[in-house]
Image (spheres, rainbow, N blue to C red):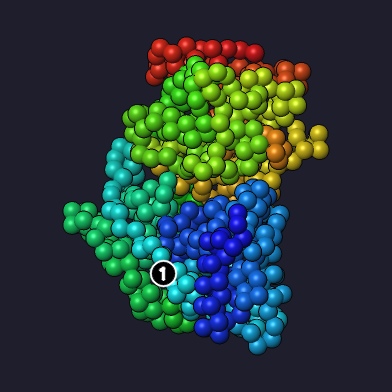
Amino acid sequence: MDTRTSPARERIARLVAALESHGLQSVLVPSSDPHISEYLPEHWQGRAWFSGFTGSMATLVVTRNGSALFADSRYWTQAEAELAGSGIELVKIPTGNSTAHIEWMAAHLSPGQVAAVDGTAIGLGAAKLLRTAVEGVGATLRTDLDVLASAWPERAALPAAPVYEHVAPHAPLPRTAKLAQVRESMRAAKASHHFISTLDDIAWLFNLRGSDVQYNPVFLAHALIDERGAALYVGAGKVDDALRATLARDGVEVRPYERVRDDLAALPAGARLLIDPRRVTLGLVQAVSAAVGLVEAVNPSTFAKSRKTSQEAVFIREAMEEDGAAMCEFYAWFESALGRETITELTIDERLSAQRKRRPGFVSLSFSTIAGYNANGAMPHYRATPDSHALISRPDGVVADGLLLIDSGAQYLGGTTDITRVWPIGTPSAAMKRDYTLVLKGTIALSRTRFPRGTPSPMLDSIARAPLWAHSLEYGHGTGHGVGYFLNVHEGPQSISKATPEPHMAMEPGMITSIEPGLYRPGQWGVRIENLVMNVSAPEAGFGEFLEFETLTLCPIDTRCIEPSLLTQDERQWLDAYHAQVRKRLAPRVSGAARDWLEKRTQPL
């Protein structure tokens, strides 16, 4: 990129001018919003707009003398390309939980200087860490300014899409029952009120959905609950009169989105407000009177929505079958067209998305499809664009031998899907097969694991890494994330990763988690094999309750990339049994070429 014409360079200059006008030395721009969301409405995508880096996670710090973007290993290659010419330094951090941006910001402050962060878009815990670091060098932190506003005249308005109801049978538990569960938890915590800002918690609790955030069926809202009723703070015009009346009958009052700070400030002296300190912003908590006691704990709804009911599990399995059938249709076309038609990474997204849209209950994709061919597959969060994508096939043959990684998913009325598969293009090399098989061994190892109920989820991470570690190989992302029920494709509280285990991360029945070990060779290829699994009860032997995984995802795992000598007999048996299940469950939903493809790709090893 021409360093003289980089849009980010001009935008950073605007932001520096805003710093000078406010008497500030620096500003921190998080990848966050007033709801601590992972995926943001355009209005709050300031970090992406100012820096030009489009990855989903990173932090930007802008000072009068220079700027830096902090990203973990999943995004290094992407960030290096997108920051070119911007003048922004890329700081490579070990994990997304790193506090390097705070340390960097403090190191670039002098006594008496002032730094800023928008208090409405930074979590309570993160704000405390930042303030401690800034004040530790004799500087001051302002949290009452949105510094971006004056430097971002093109900023999008807040989304105005309507809110709609998630109804039975796909929403088997009524909102009144869910509210009763939350109030029971409030009583246990001796809290008179409970405030929620997280969008997936609110959508689940009130059996409502929206489209304010791309790929996640949620809407911008806050909620305040007491023993008698609940207030839902939503933008004007987003809830129609009929739905407003339905909510009122269930004790839910719809109030203006902007009123939430006033209502928090009006809580009576002596009230005890339950908040999740990791899931609420500093700016909103600052509105609460000092006469109100704060009870800090994980949102009760976070636990409740993570534990899918037996009724929800029925719909989830149906959604997995529909999703698997869509993939059979796609892959049957793909293999027949390979080397005979022009196929690019963009074609993969278009064709696969079109097949999903044909399935009953489909609502939207659950995230932007990742189709990475060879070197592009080595970037875990790669996304092809019209300006930058790889050609895979031409009418006269494939472009080059290699591996195609496809990570995709969808939202159905009865569940959320997320799956990654890797397919050989031409003839894979021995090195590719070795990498693929080692990753597969990790997927199988964790899929077969049995563990005591209540095991902290991070403790399971090394099981999937062990086959790779045995060869001194590693990957930089977590092994598994929680998945919602027609909600966010990433949800907590469980996380199979290198995170420090905490009590709230305990594995419980009904939780759905991904298993997705990987291996990435920059400039060459990437491998990731991902299934979703659900915690179910395992046989007991007198040592307490145990759980095991039911594999939910239904799609063949390509065996042409396997190096058979690296698999044990037990691993072969697991894969054959999985393919037999895939064939049995999907065969009634496909026909013709898709049925033939399914039969071919699920044959025993």
Q: Residue 113, relative to residue 372: is it above or below? A: below
Percent x, y for residue 1? Answer: 60, 54
Horizontal side, residue 36 vs residue 87: left or right: left
- Residue at x-position 67% and y-position 62%: 89
- Residue at x-position 57% and y-position 56%: 53
Crowd around label 1: few <14 · some 14–19 · many ≥20 (10 Å): few
Q: Is residue 129 visible?
A: no
- Residue at x-position 35% and y-position 77%: 262
Amino acid carrying label 1: it is Pro
Dividing the picture into quadrants, the one containing residue 111 is: bottom right
Nearer the observer, 378 or 315 = 378
- Please tell me whether mark 1 sits on a helix, a strand or a loop: loop
Horizontal side, residue 304 vs residue 578: left or right: left
Dividing the picture into quadrants, the one containing residue 536 is: top right
Residue corresponding to mark 1: 153
Specify the quadrant that holds the C terminus. Answer: top right
Percent x, y for residue 394? Answer: 53, 23
Q: Is residue 13 visible?
A: yes
Percent x, y for residue 263? Answer: 35, 74
Q: Residue 416, relative to residue 15: is it above or below? A: above
Nearer the observer, 536 or 501 = 501
Q: Residue 240, relative to residue 449: is it above or below? A: below
Percent x, y for residue 384? Answer: 53, 40
- Residue at x-position 39% and y-position 56%: 202
